[in-house]
Image (cartoon, rainbow, N blue to C red):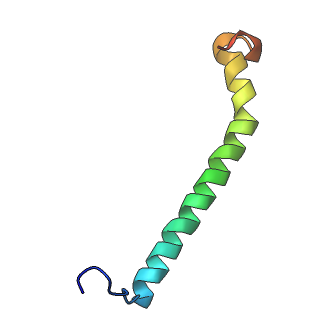
Amino acid sequence: MAGLEVPTWDPETALLIGAILLEAIVLYVGYGGLERLLGPRLMSLLIGGDEDAQ
């Protein structure tokens, strides 16, 4: 039957998918940390503080 076959996993493909997922998680956490660290300083520099932001 067409479309009902179970795909076989190539170990290299699984490793590539895992590496991409790990990279995405690291970037998500890294950019979140940078935003928490630098966000308030950048807002105060650009517009004078978080209170004026809309």
Q: Is residue 22 above or below residue 43?
A: below
Residue at 23% x, 82% y: name it. 2
Q: Position of residue 29 (x, y in %)?
A: 67, 53
Res 6 quadrant in image = bottom left
Residue 20 placement, left or right of 46? left
Q: Nearer the viewer, residue 35 or 8?
A: 8
The residue at the point 48 percent across, 81 percent down is: 15
Image quarter where the N terminus lies is bottom left
Relative to 25, is 45 above or below? above
Up/down of 36 relative to 24, above or below: above
From the top left corner, tell me how far across and down residue 31 is, in percent: 63, 46
Name the one closer to the observer, 15 or 37.
15
Image coordinates of residue 54 in percent, x first then y, are 65, 14
Numbered label tally: 0
Residue at 41%, 88% (x, y): give it: 9
Residue 23 appears left or right of 46: left
Residue at point 68% right, 37% down?
Answer: 35
* Residue 13 image-quadrant placement: bottom left
Q: Position of residue 34 (x, y in %)?
A: 68, 42
Residue at the left extreme of this rendering: 2
